[in-house]
Image: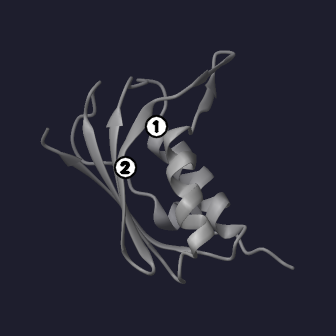
Amino acid sequence: MHIVWDNIEEIYYPIQGELKNGSHVLLAIECDSEIDELNRKLLSPFIDSWTYPHNGKYIEPFYLNSLTFNKEKTFEACIILKKKNREKDEFRLFCQDLILYLNTDNIHVKSWKLLLKEK
């Protein structure tokens, strides 16, 4: 099976607004095909436990507040930022990992939106 990888440069756009510790972020993703039951079950722990390496440590920058599947091909995650790293764009790193995760099941991301929410 040949995997086709999505290009992050065509999907990812940084959030508009200032992120700080405790910020609530809505992530809205639309895919090109249905997200099956197994992936629906695995996405929540994937998002909630996601980390990235920084200075020899693994950083867990946010936690998942809620995950909603609106339609067969779309979902929204409400994420609360624990600690903002001023040197890295955590959401870009997360976007890349989520793209890779979905692409391995031949699910491609059509739209990625980040919105800063009021608490």
Helix, strand or loop for disc 2: loop
The location of residue 22, given as percent across then percent down, is 26, 28
Residue 66 shown left or right of residue 38 in the figure: left
Q: Position of residue 36 (x, y in %)?
A: 58, 76
**Mark 1 lies on residue:** 89
Residue position marked by numbered label 2 in the rendering = 14
Q: Secondary structure at mark 1?
A: loop
Position of residue 67 relative to residue 71, above or below, is: above
Vertical position of residue 6 compared to residue 66: above or below = below
Q: Quadrant of the C terminus?
A: top left
Residue sitting at the far left: 118
Q: x, y percentage for residue 26?
A: 29, 52
Q: Residue at x 67, y 69 (%)?
A: 103
- Amino acid at dot 1: Asp
Lower position in the chain sequence, tag 2 or tag 1: 2
Looking at the rendered structure, the kind of residue marked 2 is Pro
Query: Who's the residue at 61% across and 75% down the image?
Result: 107
Foreground: 72 or 60?
A: 72
Residue sitting nearer the eye, 112 or 47: 47
* Crowd around label 1: few <14 · some 14–19 · many ≥20 (10 Å): few
Q: Residues within 10 Å of mark 2 (few under 14, many from 20)?
A: few
| Label of residue 70 in the image | none
Q: Left or right? Give the position of 57 relative to 9.
A: right
Measure how far apart labels 2 and 1 are at the Cα level: 8 Å
Tell me the quarter of the image containing the N terminus: bottom right
Residue 6's quadrant in the figure?
Answer: bottom right
Q: How is the image coloured?
A: one colour
Give the answer, above or below, for where 63 lies relative to 77: above
CB within 8 Å, label 2 to label 1? yes
- Going 39% across and 56% down the picture, which residue do you hit? 13
